[in-house]
């Protein structure tokens, strides 16, 4: 019986990607996700142009004022426009999200691939470390690292990268373990290919798929983690706006001006939602069984 | 006494791509103490027949669209779900194909037999346990009491199948339906299980439907045979009559496919073509694309079921009186 | 079965040591003296030296670790630099609040999540199913602290039903527990739904119908029982994630638990407190994972015979 997988391997690579794009277009949830992500990136890039006010311009005469025509999302305790600050805050979120996950994918997949391929003591050592890192809550590990590395955006990026790499290492290790026993690896090796070639030219591209899916959802999670750390005062320092810090400052004024907390939260939710939706669709189009993600 | 009478039933399934009809006009009878073999290739509708008799079709998005199933004179299709539950496992039992997956992995096997017992008999847990152990022993399980407390994953395939049979028999059903009970087992174990069936049916004087694609099993075990193809019964009768003098071309081809010792030919016989899928059943006689004796009438008209000279019932135009009138076979 | 438990229990010992080493070394890598906070402008060099000796800061790191560990086993986790109280005492005081919050949250997650999952699976592809899964997705993606703030806004401010913060009574437990619990509930609901549908399609379920069992009995006794296995597994793996939410939630609700102790300790660079609280939290999570493993073995008999 012809399976979907068989059909996939018959179609030449270029057409495969075209089909995948078409599949995204037909899946409405994924499309929504893609739009949200695109929107986020657009906002982050053009925040300067979109924002009606500067993010640090204070006007103490209108502090803590509710949403109005002048200030769509109200103002905070320094009279700064919340809407503009949210737009600028998206920069931090995108920056931290993409870079931290990018770094951890890099670290994780390299370590995981090597461990999975060579096996033995390398593999066992890595497994021990990843299991330990994996079962501890991200927030604790991140807090510990921030305690060491200090507060600030770059530090948050490092903290997140060092927290997340474990799950990507695990994922790719699992894939490599599965793939390295396939016949074509034997065949390639008997043709004289070096370990390096086999690992990076053949196994890696095939094994990376679940990592890409996890990373997409991971960017959303990283943005939440950044906001959480920001909320605890460990993220971007003032006056740079980060959604987490905005919500943290707003806590004191929860009863007076709740919009300072509500809007950044909604912005964050929409962002994470977008990444999750898109990630779910990626699972579909890359034909990955959901339990490899766990 | 006729125990079971399947009377011209057709079955419909609702799938994602629309409705399909895996069974069309199936009829056969079974008496007390008889073993009827239901034989056919994969896709012939054998399992669906079993599911229909057990009333399991609603759970699989299917239904009997026409006909009656008379058990002890009562039409099973007129029963409510509640009434049907009383009969399942109690008067009619089903043993299914794969013992590896027929048992719940999280409960002890003994408890699973007891569950069935206490459902249909008004007895205490310890009484049920004793009865279960007794049934297990009678089926040739050594150390029944120890096996009682084990989990399915701790048992071998043959042992698991005996447990499944025990589950089916423990409430003393009048009819046992076995759906390819030995396919997933080793050949030696197969022989043991078949012998077990024979002995059990004889001792308890019950009826049994044996569903298989293995003609050897039919020959060893069954009194009557029903040959199925593409959702229809193409031939039925006593095993001796059908096997010695097959009427339907399909039956003869099936029998001809079995290699025998001392065969003169160099290649194995096979029936040309493939079993049609349920969505693309051929018109007229469903076997016509693969039949060497087909004629134009076979393409256009579905044959009647006619009584052949040797007493079997055959669904084939060859046995109609008009057949000898035209002399042009279609290749 | 007992072998399995014993083996897992013994595994916790090396984990404990590894964790303690990691936590200790990370904190001591930090540049800057832990006692910087205590050194006032008018202090003499001699006084400074005495402080350094008191906290063993002049000794090599491994020795400091050894001292810390030795003291730990005697119940002495050092003294808080800021509070000037024994760390052990602080931990003992703050632990119950975290424990009550964590346990309640997990119980809530489980009950809510499994129910939602079962209902979703039973009403597959209907409006209820889609709605429930969207809610579950929100539960997973909303950051705990924001949810806490919103809940405070709704229930304590606008509706004036529940207390904003505090620690004493049952009422003040509700909002924090719900905040943490909803995240876990979302995760569990999604897994339960998938699991229920998967189990329902298995062969032995059809056999149960053939035995004559009614739908309700099959659902509760067999389908659910099997479906819970992956739920317990995932819960065990992600229990850290679920409980990690308690850290920020304690801050939001001003609940004097371990999380709050840890965060304030981090801000004030109170290293004995940071070490102690981190270690306790980490071990708590390891213990939680262990309990989940045991539960997993109870739920799935096939696991008990495996040698891991």
Image (cartoon, grey):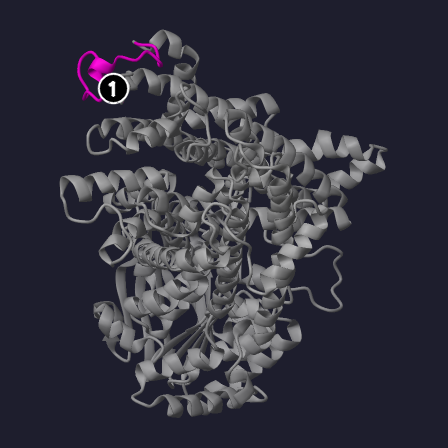
Nearest the viewer among C263 and C158 is C263
Q: Is residue A251 left or right of residue B218?
A: left
* Whether residue C64 is situated above or below residue A216 in the rendered picture: below
Q: Chain of mark 1?
A: A
Q: Residue at x 39, y 33 (%)?
A: A231
Q: Residue at x 54, y 25 (%)?
A: A154
Residue B221 percent location from the top left of the image: 53, 79
Left or right: A198 as drawn, with respect to A259:
right
Residue A59 covered by magenta stretch? yes
Residue linked to disc 1:
A75
Q: Quick one: SS at disc 1?
A: loop
Q: Is residue C307 above or below residue B302?
A: below
Magenta-drawn segment: A53-76
Instruction: Identify the residue at image location x=19%, y=44%.
Output: C155
C260 part of magenta stretch: no
Q: Looking at this rendering, what residue extends furthest in the left direction?
A: C159
Q: Name the one closer to the observer, C20 or C293.
A: C20
Residue B174 appears in the picture as rendered = no
Q: Is residue C224 left or right of residue A157?
A: left
Q: Nearer the viewer, residue A126 or B327?
A: A126
Q: Magenta: predominant secondary structure element? A: loop
Residue B316: where, in percent of width, then height?
Answer: 43, 58
- Residue B132 percent across, percent down from the top left: 44, 87
Residue beneath the point at 74% across and 38% down: A184
The residue nearer to you, when weighing C84 against B238, is C84
């Amino acid at each position: 019986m012809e399976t979907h997988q068989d059909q996939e391997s018959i179609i030449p690579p270029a057409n495969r990607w075209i089909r995948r794009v078409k599949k995204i277009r037909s899946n409405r949830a994924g499309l929504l996700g893609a739009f949200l992500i695109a929107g986020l990136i657009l906002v982050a890039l053009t925040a300067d142009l979109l924002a009606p006010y500067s993010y640090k311009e204070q006007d103490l005469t209108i502090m803590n004022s509710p949403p109005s025509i002048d200030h769509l999302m109200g103002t905070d305790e320094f009279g700064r426009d919340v809407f503009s600050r949210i737009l600028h805050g998206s920069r931090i979120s995108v920056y931290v999200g993409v870079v931290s996950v990018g770094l951890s994918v890099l670290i994780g997949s390299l370590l995981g691939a090597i461990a999975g391929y060579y096996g033995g003591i390398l593999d066992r050592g890595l497994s021990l470390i990843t299991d330990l890192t994996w079962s501890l809550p991200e927030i604790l590990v991140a807090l510990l690292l921030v305690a060491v590395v200090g507060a600030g955006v770059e530090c948050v990026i490092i903290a997140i990268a060092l927290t997340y790499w474990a799950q990507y290492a695990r994922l790719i290790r699992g894939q490599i373990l599965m793939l390295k026993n396939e016949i074509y690896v034997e065949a390639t090796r008997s043709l004289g290919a070096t370990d390096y070639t086999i690992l990076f030219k053949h196994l890696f591209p095939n094994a990376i798929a679940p990592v890409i899916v996890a990373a997409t959802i991971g960017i959303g999670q990283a943005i939440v983690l950044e906001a959480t750390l920001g909320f605890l005062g460990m993220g971007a320092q003032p006056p740079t706006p980060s959604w987490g810090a905005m919500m943290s400052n707003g806590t004191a004024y929860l009863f007076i001006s709740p919009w300072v907390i509500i809007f950044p939260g909604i912005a964050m939710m929409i962002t994470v939602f977008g990444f999750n939706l898109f990630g779910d669709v990626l699972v579909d189009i890359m034909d990955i069984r959901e339990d490899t993600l766990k | 006494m006729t125990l079971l009478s399947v009377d011209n039933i057709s079955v419909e399934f609702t799938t994602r791509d629309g409705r399909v009809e895996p069974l069309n006009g199936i009829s056969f009878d079974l008496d007390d103490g008889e073993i009827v073999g239901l034989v056919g290739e994969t896709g012939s509708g054998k399992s669906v027949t079993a599911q229909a008799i057990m009333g399991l079709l609603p759970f699989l998005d299917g239904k009997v669209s026409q006909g009656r199933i008379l058990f002890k004179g009562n039409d099973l299709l007129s029963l409510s779900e509640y009434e049907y539950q009383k009969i399942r496992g109690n008067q009619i039992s089903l043993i299914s194909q794969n013992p590896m997956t027929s048992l719940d992995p999280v409960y002890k096997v003994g408890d699973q037999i007891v569950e069935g017992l206490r459902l249909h008999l008004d007895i205490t847990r310890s009484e049920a346990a004793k009865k279960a152990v007794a049934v297990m022993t009678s089926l040739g399980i050594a150390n029944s009491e120890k096996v009682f407390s084990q989990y399915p994953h701790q048992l071998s395939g043959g042992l698991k199948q005996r447990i499944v049979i025990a589950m089916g028999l423990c409430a003393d059903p009048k009819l046992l339906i076995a759906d390819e009970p030995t396919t997933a087992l080793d050949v030696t174990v197969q022989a043991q299980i078949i012998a077990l069936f024979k002995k059990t049916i004889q001792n308890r004087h019950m009826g049994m439907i044996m569903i298989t694609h293995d003609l050897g099993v039919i020959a060893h075990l069954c009194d009557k045979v029903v040959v199925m193809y593409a959702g229809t019964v193409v031939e039925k009768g006593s095993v001796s009559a059908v096997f010695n003098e097959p009427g339907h071309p399909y039956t003869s081809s099936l029998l001809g496919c079995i290699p025998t010792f001392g065969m003169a030919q160099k290649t194995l016989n096979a029936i040309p073509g493939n079993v049609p899928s349920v969505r693309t059943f051929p018109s007229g006689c469903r076997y016509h694309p693969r039949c060497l004796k087909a004629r134009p009438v076979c393409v256009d008209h579905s044959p009647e079921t006619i009584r052949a000279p040797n007493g079997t019932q055959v669904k084939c135009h060859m046995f109609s009186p008009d057949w000898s009138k035209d002399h042009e076979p279609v290749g | 079965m007992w072998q399995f438990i014993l083996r897992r229990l013994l595994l916790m010992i090396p984990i404990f040591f590894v964790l303690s080493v990691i936590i200790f070394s990370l904190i001591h890598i930090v540049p800057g003296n832990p006692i910087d906070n205590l050194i006032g402008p008018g202090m003499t060099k001699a006084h400074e030296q005495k402080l350094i000796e008191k906290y063993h800061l002049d000794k090599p790191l491994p020795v400091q670790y050894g001292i810390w560990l030795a003291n730990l086993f005697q119940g002495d986790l050092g003294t808080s630099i800021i509070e000037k109280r024994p760390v052990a005492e602080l931990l003992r005081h703050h632990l119950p609040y975290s424990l009550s919050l964590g346990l309640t949250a997990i119980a809530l997650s489980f009950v809510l999540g499994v129910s939602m999952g079962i209902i979703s699976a039973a009403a597959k592809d209907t409006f209820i199913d889609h709605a429930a899964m969207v809610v579950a997705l929100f539960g997973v993606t909303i950051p705990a602290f924001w949810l806490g703030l919103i809940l405070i806004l709704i229930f304590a401010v606008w509706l004036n039903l529940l207390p904003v913060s505090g620690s004493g009574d049952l009422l003040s437990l509700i909002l924090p527990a719900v905040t943490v619990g909803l995240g876990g509930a979302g995760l569990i609901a999604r897994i339960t739904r998938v699991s229920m549908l998967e189990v329902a399609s298995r062969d032995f379920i059809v056999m149960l119908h053939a035995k004559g069992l009614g739908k309700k009995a099959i659902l509760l006794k067999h389908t659910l029982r099997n479906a819970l296995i992956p739920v317990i597994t995932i819960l065990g793996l992600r229990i850290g994630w679920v409980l990690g939410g308690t850290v920020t939630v304690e801050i939001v609700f001003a609940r004097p638990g371990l999380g709050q102790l840890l965060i304030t300790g981090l801000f004030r660079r109170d290293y004995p407190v940071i070490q102690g609280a981190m270690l306790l939290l980490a071990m708590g999570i390891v213990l939680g994972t262990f309990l989940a493993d045991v539960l997993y073995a109870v739920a799935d008999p096939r696991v008990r015979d495996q040698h891991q």
